[in-house]
Image: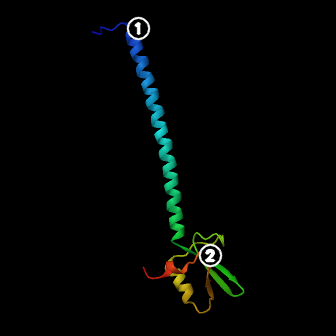
Amino acid sequence: MNDMSTSERLAKQRTLEEWLVWQLAQTRQTIRTLEVQEEREKRQAERAWVEARWKLEPARNRRSVLHRGGCGIWKGEAGFLERGEVLLALGDDSLVVEMCGVCNPEPGLRQP
């Protein structure tokens, strides 16, 4: 049924093995590339999430400072605030809130 000699069949199997090794290497490279891309997209999404929020630096001399989420001026460990929470803080007469002069958080608070 098989009209190839043993040496021909062996050569064919070695060729197939080489191709499969090459294919596996290509697949692994694609996986590494996709993992890097996925990590980059994850960092970008996290950065966008942070930038869409605010941080309220605790009061110094009875004045709190409002920063954009990504502002590096204040790296407090406190949580990020949503727009509605910031508007509540700004409306509270017991708080004196200044806008950070570096990150300028006020434009993000205007009505969309």
Q: Secondary structure at mark 2?
A: loop
Amino acid marked by disc 2: Val
Please report the residue visible at 42 percent of the width from the left and 25 percent of the height from the top. Answer: 19
- Which of the image's four quarters has the C terminus? bottom left
- Tell us which disc is closer to us: 2 or 1: 2
The residue carrying mark 2 is: 102
Please report the residue visible at 50 percent of the width from the left and 77 percent of the height from the top. Answer: 108
The residue carrying mark 1 is: 7
Q: Secondary structure at mark 1?
A: helix
* Disc 2 + disc 1, Cβ < 8 Å: no
Query: Is 67 above or below relative to 35?
Result: below
Query: Is 74 above or below relative to 90?
Result: above
Please report the residue visible at 40 percent of the width from the left and 21 percent of the height from the top. Answer: 16
Q: Earlier in the sequence, mark 2 or mark 1?
A: 1
- Work out how far the residue at label 2 is from the one at label 1, CA to CA, in angstroms: 75 Å
- What residue occupies the far bottom of the structure in this picture? 93
Q: Position of residue 96 (x, y in %)?
A: 63, 89
The 10 Å Cα crowd at callout 2, few under 14, some 14 to 19, many 20 or more, is few
The 10 Å Cα crowd at callout 1, few under 14, some 14 to 19, many 20 or more, is few
Amino acid marked by disc 1: Ser
User: Which disc is residue 25 wearing?
Assistant: none
Query: Is 6 above or below relative to 110?
Result: above
Residue 67 lies in quadrant: bottom right
Residue 1 lies in quadrant: top left
Q: Position of residue 80 (x, y in %)?
A: 57, 72
Q: Position of residue 31 (x, y in %)?
A: 47, 41
Residue nearest the observer in this picture, 107 or 14: 107
Q: Position of residue 20 (x, y in %)?
A: 43, 27
